[in-house]
Amino acid sequence: MSVLFGWLEELRNFKGEATKLPNKRIIDGHSAQGWALNLQGLKMEIWADANGLPLQMRQEGGAELLIDYRFKFDQPNVNQQLSTTIPSDYKLVAPDDE
C-alpha cells in the first residue's frame, strides 16, 4: 500500500471492521476505490481516488439518518466566498458586558 493511502490503511484496520469494496466507481471523472466500515451502529462508505483523496462518503444510522458528502479539492474561489475582506458597511462594536 502506498504512503498516499496511509489514512485508508488506518481506516481499513480500524478494529478489523473496514473492508475494501469489490467494485470501483467513477466519481467526478476520477476512478475511486471504496471502503466500508461500521462505527458504533453507523454504516460508512468512503470512496477515494488513486492519490488517496476522499471523493465521496456516505453515513447511515438506522432508518432516519442518511448523509452523503462530496469532496472537491483545488476549486476556484467564485465571488470571493472565502474572502477575509471586511464588508464596508460593517462596524466595530464593543464586546457585551458579562
Image: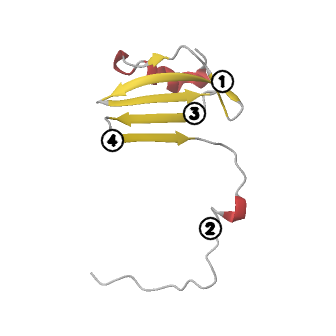
Q: Which residue is mark 4?
A: 64
Which residue reaches farthest front? Answer: 63
Q: Nearer the viewer, mark 2 or mark 4?
A: 4
Residue at the (30%, 84%) spot, across then down: 97
Q: Nearer the viewer, mark 1 or mark 4?
A: 4
Q: Measured from the top left, where is residue 54 in percent x and y?
A: 57, 33
Kind of residue indicated by mark 1? Ala
Residue at the (68%, 35%) spot, across then down: 28
Labelled pair 2, 1 in contact (Cβ < 8 Å)? no
Between the residue at mark 2 and the residue at mark 3, the CA separation in whole angstroms equals: 27 Å
Q: Which image quadrant: the C terminus?
A: bottom left
> In which quadrant of the rendered view does residue 77 lie?
bottom right
Q: Measured from the top left, where is residue 86 in percent x and y?
A: 61, 76
Q: Nearer the viewer, mark 4 or mark 3?
A: 4
Q: Which residue is mark 3?
A: 54
Mark on residue 84?
2
Between disc 2 and disc 1, whose residue precedes? 1
Between the residue at mark 1 and the residue at mark 3, the CA separation in whole angstroms equals: 10 Å
Kind of residue indicated by mark 3? Pro
Kind of residue indicated by mark 4? Glu
Q: Measured from the top left, where is residue 18 in percent x and y?
A: 42, 19
